[in-house]
Amino acid sequence: MSFNTFGRLLRFTTWGESHGPALGAVVDGCPPRLALSEADIQPFLDKRRPGQSKFTTQRQEADRVRILSGVFEGQTTGTPISLMIENTDQRSKDYGEIAQAYRPGHADYAYDAKYGLRDYRGGGRSSARETAARVAAGAVARLIIPEVRIAAWVCEIGGDAIDRDNFDAAEIGNNPFFCPDPQTAARWEKLVDEARLAGSSLGAVVECEAVGVPAGWGAPLYAKLDSELAAAMMSINAVKGVEIGDGFHAARLTGEQNADPMRPEDGHGGPRFLANHAGGIAGGISTGQPVRVRVAFKPTSSILTPVDSITRAGEATQVRTKGRHDPCVGIRGVPVVEAMMALVLADQKLLQRGQCG
Amino acid sequence: MSFNTFGRLLRFTTWGESHGPALGAVVDGCPPRLALSEADIQPFLDKRRPGQSKFTTQRQEADRVRILSGVFEGQTTGTPISLMIENTDQRSKDYGEIAQAYRPGHADYAYDAKYGLRDYRGGGRSSARETAARVAAGAVARLIIPEVRIAAWVCEIGGDAIDRDNFDAAEIGNNPFFCPDPQTAARWEKLVDEARLAGSSLGAVVECEAVGVPAGWGAPLYAKLDSELAAAMMSINAVKGVEIGDGFHAARLTGEQNADPMRPEDGHGGPRFLANHAGGIAGGISTGQPVRVRVAFKPTSSILTPVDSITRAGEATQVRTKGRHDPCVGIRGVPVVEAMMALVLADQKLLQRGQCG
Amino acid sequence: MSFNTFGRLLRFTTWGESHGPALGAVVDGCPPRLALSEADIQPFLDKRRPGQSKFTTQRQEADRVRILSGVFEGQTTGTPISLMIENTDQRSKDYGEIAQAYRPGHADYAYDAKYGLRDYRGGGRSSARETAARVAAGAVARLIIPEVRIAAWVCEIGGDAIDRDNFDAAEIGNNPFFCPDPQTAARWEKLVDEARLAGSSLGAVVECEAVGVPAGWGAPLYAKLDSELAAAMMSINAVKGVEIGDGFHAARLTGEQNADPMRPEDGHGGPRFLANHAGGIAGGISTGQPVRVRVAFKPTSSILTPVDSITRAGEATQVRTKGRHDPCVGIRGVPVVEAMMALVLADQKLLQRGQCG
Amino acid sequence: MSFNTFGRLLRFTTWGESHGPALGAVVDGCPPRLALSEADIQPFLDKRRPGQSKFTTQRQEADRVRILSGVFEGQTTGTPISLMIENTDQRSKDYGEIAQAYRPGHADYAYDAKYGLRDYRGGGRSSARETAARVAAGAVARLIIPEVRIAAWVCEIGGDAIDRDNFDAAEIGNNPFFCPDPQTAARWEKLVDEARLAGSSLGAVVECEAVGVPAGWGAPLYAKLDSELAAAMMSINAVKGVEIGDGFHAARLTGEQNADPMRPEDGHGGPRFLANHAGGIAGGISTGQPVRVRVAFKPTSSILTPVDSITRAGEATQVRTKGRHDPCVGIRGVPVVEAMMALVLADQKLLQRGQCG
């Protein structure tokens, strides 16, 4: 793992800024002889793509991915897969006036403090646009773990949570919020639209579940499956919290309540668990139960209300972020969370095979 | 970063099982010419040491650390610092009867699924005893960042939270719970004692704050300061959730509520922030505000109540974990959380100096 | 360091095949605020570019580099620098007939044994064309170490070595062989031309010297400066040997002969060394003397003489490699060796600054 | 790979100084369920142990290894294996007088330039005593690759080379030089003894061969098998050169001479090669032929003849290194070279299994 690289055996390195000519990912360590073409990647990018409803940024990006290496005659060769997405809608004039002021909540000040300069065009490297590269890499990772089904959804926006009794996985694709509860989705329509019209923004919670992960993936102690997932999710822009299984709720349970009792055989060779408070991970290693993660996204920092700030010269000012922004950045976080889940699991599958055969 | 190694420039590798002859850490990449002796490390181990009150396990471990390398004439040499702690109280007979059954909530089944065997003596490598090695390594890390003050405390046990209005940092060391609110500490005494007597256990939430971190530590995107902290904290035994700043609460705020406005100069060269919802990190890079992390510990999995389980042979059984266990493992998590904070920050300091001079 | 990534703090990842649409490198960890444009990189690529004399392959590649990220307003931002070179002369028909046979001396059989397939177009990932990406990355590395002057040259072709008494650094650029001895260059003209006309090939030895490396770069024990250089050089296509300082010759000296005596001050703060058998490195750490490396390139494996081989199906065959090949691949290795020297030294400079301030 | 850590999936970290209380290695990533006890490691340490003939240093070290973790009931558990060797003969008075002067040829000056201090007791971390930890780790690595037979020997001392026609592997263990040619061994006896009596020293060349490595281990481009071997060997104290296969000699061959022709089937599923100039590696990946490496050791830097040097204060002085030193450090390099070969190959086996299944 290095600054812009994630993973151990399956590694990807992302590059590119929101307003540069292109961005991309280099995926290294992929097994050979997997069928791969752009068509395997594009649907995931399309899911993340902006401008598809009024609830996401109106920035228009085609987000067409090109495979530049690592695939020959439709198969992965085992060598680095270079994925590139050209930026097509780079209206950097939108950002011109904030070149000299720091946008509160954004990385502007922190980048300047670190590097002594910043790319003020849309946040440069700190833009959520980088997540397109992860989604592309994640699509490759999915091919490595065909035994695993990964799904994520939004379970809460602006404090308004879904009703668990209404959970219907089939509904997730039927609304612009990746919401598994149609009644909640209807409420969110109003909620997010109001925020959008007010130039405000809302936070969200995304849940992700991976079904089919066999027992035995992960490793003590600093490559624990949960530790890797926490790093992966917390590396996504705007994420402020990560839970595995019951997460913070587990801190309110007794040992008896939190136990995941086991009964003989589940028909798949493992025990039948009577509960899954652990979120499918014990001691950093998968148990064979569904792996469950919850991820908190803060509200988009770009809002129309002026916020106190300072200029690079240290003078007081106020910043209103016009541009074209997501009223709730967590919504488009769904395919990104799925991608990171896939990337972590694929890496751990290869690691397990490497060490334990 | 490898399986049992954490860090990038400042790296530590831990080894050892709960019932082996010893455990330890090798700290590599430490700057030279720092004054270091066992006396700099021992107080942190003593803080974590079991058997100091009836609220923690009665296992008696001296936890005396020895420095075996990397220090010459009282100074670090810049070469690997080998730290060793001998295990003195290895009553493995306590564990004998669970050799053939999996303890629910523990890593027993997952380890067996991964490795095809397990060290059943007290959990072997999955034992929280490994955290002693981290605490020792963390004491070295603190020497690298004298400009930073790190403090952690328990803010919630079994769902009973401190009253923020009573927060008094000076109280943290005055009770066996690392509790900054004496009234809450009094309630916890009863709460934890009841759990202990009932052979039950409780979860806890630990908060940690690092004051004095300059702006500019951290890095995009997979070495983000928050991503590193998430990995570090989630790698601790029994941790199920990590929050930076407002964490999950941020998902319930609007952009206006979540903003951290800036005003000119704070007297230390940086801006004065009017709030710290971000927990001192923006875009993965420190802002100069206090770095704040919250960590959820599940209740200790070892309880006296029998829980349904299976044997290695797949037969139904029940497991009661007798042994000597912490009724609330989160309490002794406090020095471990501090150690991981120190290790992450020290590493990021060196990385920042390396890349940006 | 991963499969296609090299370096620790300054890392680069290369991707691309000889006959794909493009190849490139992502350079991560570069310090910010270095002036960088394509014009800083292109001269080094031009030096390596094929088709510039009859002594190198006639394949015509423009080798124009594009910077796709990591530079803003003419300065490095500290974020990943993506460098891309499009392939323009992909006459893959030249290679069609060897799709079913393994070229002896090439990686064809080994790749197939490893991956179960191979990209037979010009060797795919194993092609020396990958070195263009290294040369581009090396040009960035040079900006990090302005205090160091790096020069490489060919000192031997086909067993015909330069005369040390004729060594004139100013001559290196005056002949197509990077030869510092004009008389030897004249002999090589005949030697290489004969090999070319015969469809044969010759090996070569390249020497590289870095002047201005301060004492103190490198690290025990597996990041030793000499160990890093050995890995870097041996990773270049066709390289079979690496020497530091006197190399294998040192094995024939006595301790007295091999000593590098020291006298007080050299005017630059360090001692004055009376010899440099060590090649500027002791204990894996630079001494302040010139760092000297020698690298052996085998003869190009592609020759017109038929060589016994087998087909993928295991049948006996013979392979004559037509294509357009370098009669002496070591010649074009000169800018590659320089690039790898720059990349290793720049990385070690950042590491030293990180650990020791 | 970090400063004192080597490897990717199978990683080992060494620690300890020549005159500290102990030294050791932590081996991480080892597959589980391998039978392992101290008895599997001790013979390799005994082979390297000093004081066994008058041709090696008279320092007496028991070099008894202890396994402190990672083994349970005689089997590896898959968790870190901590190996410790106590130093028993730490006559540091021998070194006292050189505390203020730099020994030429040693790392004294370079360490001081880097770290601003040095452990002058026998070179501290730069002492060849560190190689004991590698030999111990290498013994573990051998268990991972039972299909591979590794043997090393000395082929040249002080410029006096073995006669290839007399090569007899069975003779290697029959003389104190690991020499496969008894006639040469007889000459070396005189040669090394003269050097010893004169307080002088000699260089040596060690060869190592690994038979049974299947085709397909290694990886492009910065984890090439030959690149890993070069890094591994060059990281050994006193090594100044590394060759794979024909090495520098290949630079003097034509393409026709250097070809390794292939004929159908060798009875083991691979082709039959008619030569092995490549040393068993093509394109960084093993071909199934024996892997061959040659390693140049410089003469021991510690000699009785006074050599010009300077003090820490920069004053002219002369240094005579009394102590008890190997007249030819390359001899005891044999088990170290074997260990590094085993460690690299075992790592690559796991990597290959991880990526390619």
Image (cartoon, coloured by chain):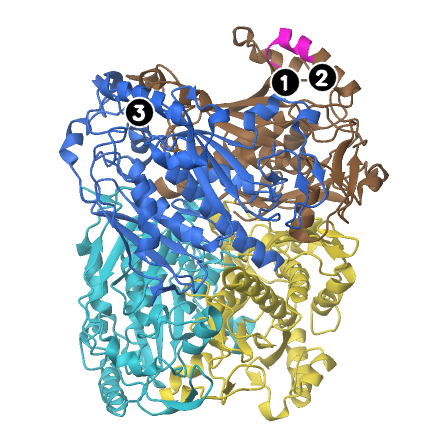
Chain colours: A yellow, B cyan, C brown, D blue
SS for callout 1: strand
Residue C157 got which mark?
1
Q: Are marks 2 and 1 in contact (CB under 8 Å)?
A: yes
Name the residue: 20% across, 38% down: D60
Q: Foreground: D181 or B202?
A: D181
Of label 2 and label 1, which has the lower sequence position? Answer: 1
Looking at the rendered structure, the number of numbered marks drawn on it comes to 3
Q: Where D144 falls versus C333 (above or below)?
A: below
Q: Chain of mark 3?
A: D
Binning the other alpha carbons within 10 Å of mark 3 as few (below 14), some (14 to 19) or many (20 upward) gives: many
Query: Taken as a whole, is the magenta stretch helix, strand or loop?
Result: helix
Residue B159's disc number: none
Q: Can the viewer see residue B340?
A: yes
Residue underneath mark 3: D301
Check disc 2 and give the amino acid type: Val
Q: Is residue C269 left or right of residue C82?
A: left
What range is drawn magenta here?
C178-188
Residue type marked 3: Ser
Q: Please, what is the three-letter code of the amino acid marked with disc 1? A: Ile
Residue marked by disc 2: C192
Q: Chain of mark 1?
A: C
Q: Is residue A149 left or right of residue D123?
A: right
Looking at the image, which is closer to me, C188 or A70? Answer: C188
- Res. C86 visible in picture: no
- The answer to which of D339 and A272 lies nearer the viewer is D339
The answer for how far apart the CA atoms under marks 2 and 3 are is 41 Å
Q: Which quadrant of the view contains residue D317?
A: top left
